[in-house]
Structures are given as C-alpha cells and as structure tokens.
Amino acid sequence: MATSPPTEVTAMRNAYVDQFPDEARVIKAAFWSSFIALAIGGTLGLVQALHRTDVFRFIQSPDYYTVLTAHGVLLAITFTIFFLVGTFTWAVTTSLDRGVVDVRFTWAWYIMMVVGTVLVAIAIFSGFLESAPSVLGSELNADVLFTFYAPLEAHPIFYIGLVLFVVGSWLAGVDWFRTWLAWRSENPDERIPLPTFMVLTTTLFWYICTFGVALSILVFLLPWSLGITESVNPLLTRTLFWYFGHAVVYFWLMPAYMMWYIMLPKFSGGKLFSDPLARVVFVLFLLLSTPLGIHHQYLDPGIAEGYKFIAMTNTMFLLLPSLLTAFTVVASMEHGARQRGGEGYLGWLKALPWRNPIFTGMALAGLMFAAAGFSGMINAGMNINYLVHNTWWVVGHFHLTVGTAVALTFMAASYWFIPQLTGKELWNRSVALGQVLLWFIGMTFMSNAMHRSGLFGMPRRTAEPQYQGFDFEPAVGTVGEINMQVALGGVILTLSLALFLLNMIMTSIGDDSESIPDNTYAGTLSGAEDSPRILDNLKLWTAIAVVLVIIAYTLPLASIIDAGGLFGPGIEGVRLSTWVDPAVIESLGEVIR
C-alpha cells in the first residue's frame, strides 16, 4: 500500500470507512466493546485503590474480591482482546487491500465473544447480591480473581462464558487466515505484508498458548463446577493456567508492538528502520512466549527446582525480541525526527511531534514498557523473585505492562482509529494530549508506590494488607505516603479515562469530515525483499514452537499428575466472598484505621 506523510489530506477522502465500510462497522463494534470494558474495569480499579488504602470505603471487604475479579477480567481479557481483534482486522484488510472473505462470519465471532463476555459478567457481578440466584443447581458467583485456578471455584456460567469468548477469538483468527489465503491465491509470489505477517504469527501463538487454559476449563474446572467430577488437582490447573497466563501478556502486547512498528514511524515523519527485524521479533515471540509460564510458580513446592530453572532461562531469552524492538522503533523515530530537521546525538528528540496525542501516547507507553522490562527481570530471576513474589511489586509490574504499555498505546491509537472508522474528525486534540499525559503521570505515581511497597513485603490480592501486631517498615518514606501515592494515581487515572471516553463519544457523534488523513502507515528503509523467505514459513516456526512447548512442559506435568493424580486428592471448591468471615475482615480493617 502506498504511504503518505502523516499530515497529508487528499482531495478525495480515503479513510478506512470509505475503503471497507462493512468491516469498519465490525471493528467499531469491537472497539466500543473494548471501551465499555475499560470504563467499567477502570472505575472498579479506583474502588480498589481507595478501599485498600483506606482513603474511602463504601463496599464491604468481602465484596472487594468481586471488584478485584471484575477489574482483572474486564481489563486483562475483555478490554485487551476486543481491541486486538478490531486492530488485527484493520491490519489484515488494510495491508492486503481486500475485505474479509465473508463479513457475516466476522459478525458471528464478534457476537460469540460478546455473549461470552455477558455470561462472565453476570457470574461475576452476581457476587454483589446479598442473595444471588441459583442457576444450574448452585448460587451465581465468580470471585476467583483474574487467575481463576483451583481451589477457587466459580459458577459454571463463568467458565462457559470464558469458553465462548476464547472460541470466538479462535474464529477471528480463522477469519484472518481465510482472508490471507484468498489474497495469496491471487498473489502467489508476493511476500506476506508486514502487518498481516504480524497478525498471523500472533494468531498461531494464541492457538498454542490457549490450549492450556482450554484444557483446564473444559476437562477440569467446568466439570468440577457442574458436579460431574468430585475434585481437581489444584497444582495441575494452576500450571495449565500459567502455561497460558504469561503468554497472554504477549498476546496483549502484540497489537501494541505492531502499532509501534507501523504507526510510530509514520507519525514521527519517517519510515520503519527494518521490516526484516520486525519479522524476526514476531517469530521469536511465537517461539519463546509459551514455554516459560512456570516462572510464575517459583514458590510452588510441587514443581522441581530444575523445571523452574529451565523456565527462568527461557524467560531471559525472551528479552531479545523486546531489545530488538526497542532498537528498531527508536531508530525509526530518529529517522523521522531527522527528516523533520532534528540534529545532534539527542537533539533530534526535540523534533519529534510531541503535540500529537497519537505519537506522544505511544512513545510514553513504550517508555513505560522499558521500565516494566527492568522490574520484569526481577520477577524472572528465580532467587530474586522470592523477595517480591505475591507482593504489590508484581501488581506494579503488570500495571506498567498491560496497564500502560498496552492500555496507553490502545487509547492513543484510538485517536487515529475512530476517525478512520467513522469518517469524523477527532473532537479535541488538546484534550487527547492532556489525557495521555495524565495517564502517564497517574501510572507513574501508582506503579512507583506499588513497586516500593513490594520491596518491604506488602501483599497483593487482599482487601486488608496490614496485619495485627505488625507494622511494615519502608526503607524510604512511610506506608501512609505510599498509600496516598496509590490513591492519587488511581484518581488521576480515572480522570484520564473519563477524558478518553468523552473524546471517543464526542468524536463518534460529530459531523462527517473530509479532513481525515489517508488510511496509510509508514514505509520501510529496509523492506521485505531484504529478508530471507524462510521467515514467512509459518508452518516451520509453528512446528518448532510446539516442540519447545512439549520439551518445556511434558516432564513437569507428568510429575504433577504422578504426585497428585489427574483429578486431585478430593479438593473442595472455595468461594472467596462467602468463605471470608466478615467479622474477621472487620477486625483486620481496624488495624489500618
């Protein structure tokens, strides 16, 4: 596809909605599903921050776990994946310059994902009811947190909803592959366009990594919740979840990476430094992202230390594609800045378009992701991880990854996508710029405080972090100061979220405009023709990825099953909001007051 300068407006509008009106409607629906999940989940995040820091409490502490579950599921799964399927549909159709094979099939997988989301939400939010209705022989409840492994047990509707959502995402991948195969039949000698290559490799990786969570739900958790099986093996379901649970982080990140590669250079005013390096990065993510989930289980006594060491080694290898991305994207930005007149070793930074909210949001997201890489190295190191495991350090880390690198990139990109999908000019660029800056500032306060609190052992996943007869002692500052940072960060983030939603709504209800930039992305300094064709051999890379997964997980899973049995030793399910004694919670709450 031909490229054009980022500010160019042609006489005849060439927005995405003009090229692909049917697909634009589906993508717009997917984005608004994502925005609704972001609005609800983000608001619940503020409730958590204020409750846990004891700044303002209006829910009972047992209900905190319902809030925590909804916050995690809506933001980490619903918000991210709805935005991903919309972005990937845009990328495939734009880069192949053709619509999907059958838009009815596209609507079908989108509707399946919506139905799955609604079922999951019903199960979770029923936890707020004093007397939840009984369905399928048990009370509606799903206080199982984002991780949802045994012995925490949810209502069957929760698991059924997850299955529908994941299957819908699988069908979305089928849709993208069908579109690419139709294009390839007409262009047999052409290289896969880079955006489509990124989509296809990410989809293959998604199929591999979701096998674990699908197995966990369909074979163990769902039959257990229905009473078909009497027990589960908690360590087995935990391991199957983390087989998926760390890999899904990269599934969220891949659309952000894609936009950093093909959009940041465009808005910088230049070209992508290297198409071949971008392809190598996505192949490496396909190969390396799944065989390392056990690094989340360093403190699990049922897994041998040798397996944990292998997971640590695999995790360290995964630093390579991130470092390659940093080099390629920054080089592309520098090229653009120098095209705009930037000079000197660092002086070119001043020439970048910092007043453009799309560029600034993505650039700040990338900067935060670099910080997340440093804290992630602590998580990955087996011995060092023991110091911060299950503390607020971990929460601070993933608020830098999914909460900033992903979320801020998605919001910044929306300032490009929504005008493309609606044909309406962005309502207010100044508000958009202020919004991305506020998100960066709010997350700086919150994640800094969370990382610091983790260093002195402040626990995560609890409504009452303080203990009776015990005081945390930070090396610098006080617990009160750290709590205020978390609360302040939560308030700033919520304000930023409100501004984002306002801009999206006002843009969508505005008047049609002819001042929409062309639906193009950056060209390349080094194109696909400079890379070996073997990089496009998706069958080869998929086969290698599967072999690596088998090598990493066969012996650990066999050991877990041998020790605890396939269905476990008679574990009863736990419902957090009904299991936690409100009187005990209240007495603990008095400690931090």
Image (cartoon, rainbow, N blue to C red):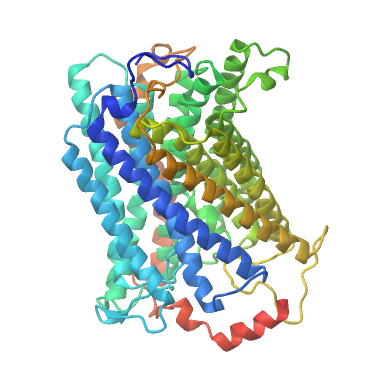
Residue 575 visible in the displayed image: yes
State the image coordinates of residue 338 (x, y, percent, origin top left): 63, 12
Q: How many marks?
A: 0
User: In this rendering, would 91 be left or right of 329?
Assistant: left
User: In this rendering, would 405 be left or right of 122?
Assistant: right
State the image coordinates of residue 448 (x, y, percent, origin top left): 70, 51
* Quadrant of the frame with the N terminus: top left
**Which residue is painted at 39% across and 37% down in the image?**
510
**Which residue is painted at 62% across and 84% down in the image?**
586
User: In this rendering, would 189 be left or right of 452?
Assistant: left
Q: Nearer the viewer, residue 406 or 352?
A: 352
Residue 41 sits above or below residue 336 on the image: below
Quarter of the image holding residue 507? top left
Q: Nearer the viewer, residue 225 or 18?
A: 18
**Which residue is painted at 46% across and 52% down in the image?**
38
State the image coordinates of residue 175 (x, y, percent, origin top left): 23, 37
Residue 180 sits above or below residue 375 on the image: above
